[in-house]
Image: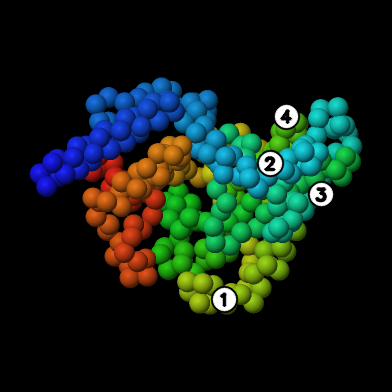
Amino acid sequence: MRLVELAAVDAAKTQVAKLRRAIRQSLKAQGFHLRGNSVSFRQRRDKRSIRKRHRLAVAKRILLAKSSLEELEDGLLSFIASGSEIDPARIAPRLHQVEPDTIESRLFKYACLHWSIPISDGYGRRLRFLIFDDSNGKIIGLFGLGDPVYSIKARDEWIGWDADAKADSLYHVMDAYVLGAVAPYSRLLGGKLVALASVCDEVRRAFARRYADRRSLIAGKKREPHLVLLTTTSALGRSSLYNRIKFRDRTVFERVGFTGGWGEFHFSDGVYERLTGFANGPCVTTGKQEQCGRGFGNRRERVRKALSTLGL
């Protein structure tokens, strides 16, 4: 009995040592600086270094999508223009709303896999759009709208919301969780075209059609679906894409500040799954809502608890 107990202890110590080593190696490969048990951003916070930190997360999303898109790749690539197929004087943008389980929905997903940072699928209410060039049938760019984050201090202060006003009005706001042009249109200011298209009347009408006569899930209310504001954030810091975009001398996008928060994108190369398996053992959950069950409330809690237990 004593030998079995000692063997179990040794196995647990070995598991902890291997997991700590895997975490440190993964973070170091992404450009983080490790000293002792702490992690810091030692290198410059320029766009190149930010992309490097997201590289493994992007690779993970590509791997997960491979089984569903690989057989379609040749057909999807036919929508991507080469430079010789574009005549800037003949570009004819056409907005197309993406519906589920269509070739356009797969094209949207495929294009997002080529962003330099991992693109989420959005959450809550969602509207997706592609912009095609009718002169050649190729894709210019895309944007996806989803439910906005509830608390963004810079946005709320710019609008002047108090808690009651925000609870009542946030329904009429959507967030562009992905927005941009694909190559080679991205070299022809295509991103600015996509940004301008995101606020066009066709998008407002699509929002009204999609959510007419629907009851909100949390508040249980029916509201008139008027889209009055789009928000978006740039994962790479200040972005020139939204600068100087005007319609009839009216500025379309205005920078209002910076967000703050947490994420766990840097545990995307299999380390998160190992952290989860470890957290399910010695870590104590902190979920307080009955409807959330007895497990961890979210990915961040798993990561935080596991790292703390590992002494990191």
Which mark sits nearer the N-terminus, 2 or 1? 2
Cα gap from disc 1 to disc 3, whole angstroms:
31 Å
Picture layout, residue 164 above or below residue 91 = below
- Helix, strand or loop at label 1? It is loop
Are the two marked residues, 4 and 1, in contact with CB atoms closer than 8 angstroms?
no
Say what amino acid the circle numbered 3 marks.
Arg
The residue carrying mark 4 is 187
Tag 1: Cα neighbours inside 10 Å, few (<14), some, or many (≥20)?
A: few
The residue located at (24%, 26%) in the rendering is 36
- Expressed as whole percent of the image width and height from the top left, the position of residue 141 reads 72, 42
Cα gap from disc 3 to disc 2, whole angstroms:
27 Å
Say what amino acid the circle numbered 1 marks.
Arg
Does residue 253 appear to the left or right of 272 in the view shown? Answer: right
Label of residue 94 in the image: 3
Say what amino acid the circle numbered 4 marks.
Arg
The residue located at (27%, 51%) in the rendering is 281
Say what amino acid the circle numbered 2 marks.
Glu
Which mark sits nearer the N-terminus, 4 or 3? 3
